[in-house]
Image: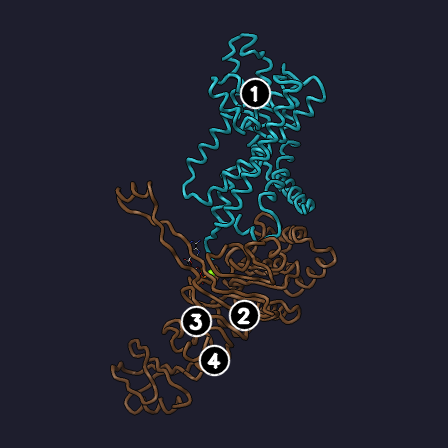
Amino acid sequence: MPIIEVEHLMKDFMIAKRETGFLGAVKSLVKREHIKKEAVKDISFSIGEGEMVGYIGPNGAGKSTTIKMLTGILVPSSGSVTVNGIIPYENRQENAKNIGVVFGQRTQLWWDLHTIESFELLKEIYQVSGKRYKENMDTFTEILGLDEFLNTPVRQLSLGQRMRADIAASLLHDPPILFLDEPTIGLDVIAKEKMRTFIKGINNERKITVILTTHDMEDIEKLCERMILIDHGQKVYDGEIAVVKERFGKTRTLIVDLEESSHSLQLKGGEVFKEEASRFWIRFNRDEVSASELISQITETHNIKDLTVEEPAIESIISRIYQEGYQELTETVKI
Amino acid sequence: MFRFRLYWTFTKKAFLRSAVYRFDVWSRLGSNLIFLLMWGSIWTALFAGREEAGGVSFESMLTYIVVSQFLSGVNGAGTPLWEIQEKVRTGDISLKLMRPFDVPLRYLFADFGSVAFYILTALLPLYTVMFIFMDLTLPSSWETWALFIVSAFTGFLIRYCIEMSFGLLSFFLVETGGIVDVFYFAMSLLSGSVIPLWFFPGWLERMALYLPFQGIYYIPNAVFIGRISGIEILLSLSVQLFWAAASYLLLRFVWKCASQKVVVQGG
Ligand SMILES: Nc1ncnc2c1ncn2[C@@H]1O[C@H](COP(=O)(O)OP(=O)(O)OP(=O)(O)O)[C@@H](O)[C@H]1O
Ligand SMILES: [Mg+2]
């Protein structure tokens, strides 16, 4: 039984068109024209209890819009959503009790309250028992180091502190489902790592179902087994990350700096896909040719100043997929 | 099921929060006094030494103005129209849709808190002093006092529902300047807050009597200064209750439409 089910979900935004010139201004007085922006068009997926799924895609893909429909904030233009058996936008208050939400871009806490007061207010709002509140606060304080800023007004928190406060706040009422929209945005390397450990922990220990959007593929790599990739409001991949890595991970990139610039670097088994002055990016499949073979091919005609071989981190796989389109991906794995 | 304890939390929070923004209280009280002085002098000039006009004594008229400014202080201590519009524009209200409470009620109860703070710390002391030192009409019986309080509270509810409904219209309109003007026009003139309805030309008085705004200033004030009495009071209170129910239904309707139309910028 999936805990989240989304079918043929769509969301259009009507954007008022700005008319230019005098006639345009007069015209828009009478009738304003609207442009339809399809933020999400026909997305379907289902997520099982306890899963942690990475929901990724380039800027403007429709990730946040989907999350807002799952939380009940936005009403879909068409299609259906069920979250823990509830249709979020029809039964917002019931849905609210089942979900925790963090929007990395804006805090849910009260700007002018002290952090601890925000937590106490949430305790009342969600009617968390005193005992449970204390248990949760103790756990979160220990892992996230909340005590360092509990008595600071929220508006004075640093980004990292605010994010820690926000995620703790989203979990106070023990929701079975957690939506994280860019929970690591703007955090430093160590803070990111701590955040990941925390998310991993609550998913493991509390069996909380998590949907996570991010632009940091390391988040995905470290946290999720499954990812849903969307672009232009449509799903382009839904499956195991390992499969993508296996399929695309065979590709390596050799970057060489030559002593002199050259316009003709023809290599057997390698493909130059980018060049800048005397630097060349060469893509090759490690099953077909080895890096040392390529290097010796180059040194026959050129002098190499410097070189690196790039590992295919999911990061580069995804950025390659963003750049080159999804054809290969859809061929590889049937959605 | 109405979870009183939950909403009461917002009342308490808002009460305490007001204590932090003390400057707000003082500046609001200052402008309240200025308006009181202004309308007091205007009406003194209009009476021009006469003891009575429009069937009302000068003393009652002055009382009317004072009570009116008191009520204006009470109503003005809630979330103002521009702030509701601001909350709509920034998406604050929309994001509250993922919380387990009813949004219009949540703001109403928060307003109870800030208004209570303002009444207790500023309005009550000031207006008590005013009633002691000025020649003003006081209700003669405790029943009238009680009816005045009920009427003023009902008026507050009517004002809240209407102001909130107008504020939520920002969900549908890009430009709201006209809406704001209509609101403030109705609030200041048609409510009888600065000119009692009995001074209106016949057609305007009839119009005002068919609208909800009289319930905010005119009716409680008419009760207070004894312009209406006995069965008339009960009649006026029923009219008020009718408008309270109607404006609440309006608010629910606007809120329902708005929450279907919600957009949140950014993210
Ligand atoms: N309130 C709105 N009004 C009009 N268009 C909107 C609105 N919200 C989002 N959009 C548009 O819908 C599309 C999807 O936006 P969304 O915020 O879901 O993207 P995203 O995947 O979260 O992107 P990012 O990674 O940049 O956060 C974008 O083209 C955006 O401009
Ligand atoms: Mg986003």
Considering every residue shown, the one lying at the far top of the view is B50
Q: Amino acid at mark 2?
A: Val
- Say which residue appears at 52% left-offset and 50% top-offset: B94
Q: Is residue B165 above or below residue B239?
A: below
Q: Which chain is brown?
A: A
Q: Is mark 2 within 8 Å of ligand 1?
A: no
The x and y percentages for residue B106 are 61, 44
On screen, residue A93 versus residue A23, left or right, reads right
Disc 1 Cβ-to-ligand 1 distance below 8 Å: no
Q: CA distance from mark 3 to mark 4?
A: 16 Å
Please determine whether, in this image, residue A258 is positioned above or below residue B208: below
User: Which numbered dot is residue B65?
Assistant: 1
* Cα distance between the residues tagged 3 and 2: 15 Å
| Residue at the right extreme of this rendering | A131
Q: Amino acid at mark 4?
A: Lys
Q: Are marks 2 and 4 on the same chain?
A: yes
